[in-house]
Image: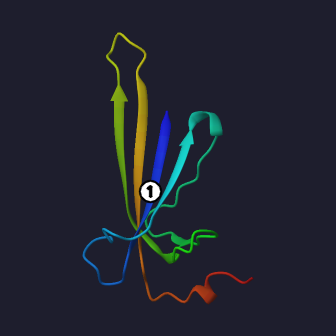
Amino acid sequence: MKYYIDYQHMPKGAARPLDNGNVVPIEANDKNGLVILPNVGDFVHIEFVRGGAEGFSGKVRSRLFRYFADGSEKEQIETSCTVNIVVEETDDDWGRLIKE
């Protein structure tokens, strides 16, 4: 199975994630082994090391899993899953979360 994981930025107080904001796409598959995804309530920091895009931080507000199957019951079915993770900005003090 192939997995496509998108992280979306949701500014504090917004009703929904940004339509024109940065989406962080990640592709994984069963051959890559274990993929650890943050759960609702986990803290996440996204930092872009290239490309000049602005990173974002916050708590995971929601996770949406959408599964797609290509084929029929008699054929080998190839399945893929898209995971959308919304990261909402918070007032949390990140300095209190980790000591570097």
Residue 51 vertical placement versus 70 (above, below): below
Question: In the displayed structure, does residue 34 sit left or right of residue 42?
Answer: right
Please name whichever residue, 16 or 96, is drawn nearer the observer in this view of the structure: 16
Horizontal and vertical percent position of residue 57: 50, 77
Farthest-out residue, right: 100
Residue under the point 59% across and 70% down: 48
Q: Quadrant of residue 7?
A: bottom left
Horizontal and vertical percent position of residue 56: 50, 76
Please name whichever residue, 47 or 93, is drawn nearer the observer in this view of the structure: 47
Residue 53 vertical placement versus 63 (above, below): below
Residue under the point 33% across and 72% down: 18
Farthest-out residue, top: 74
Residue at the disc numbered 1? 6
Q: Quadrant of residue 46?
A: bottom right
Residue under the point 49% across and 87% down: 92
Question: In the displayed structure, does residue 48 sit left or right of residue 6?
Answer: right
Residue under the point 38% across and 71% down: 21
Quadrant of image for the C terminus: bottom right
Element on which disc 1 rests:
strand
Farthest-out residue, front: 51
Crowd tier of the residue under label 1, counting other residues whose Cα lies within 10 Å: few below 14, some 14–19, many 20 or above:
some
Q: Quadrant of residue 67?
A: top left
Colouring of the image: rainbow
Name the amino acid type tagged 1. Answer: Asp
Horizontal and vertical percent position of residue 79: 42, 30
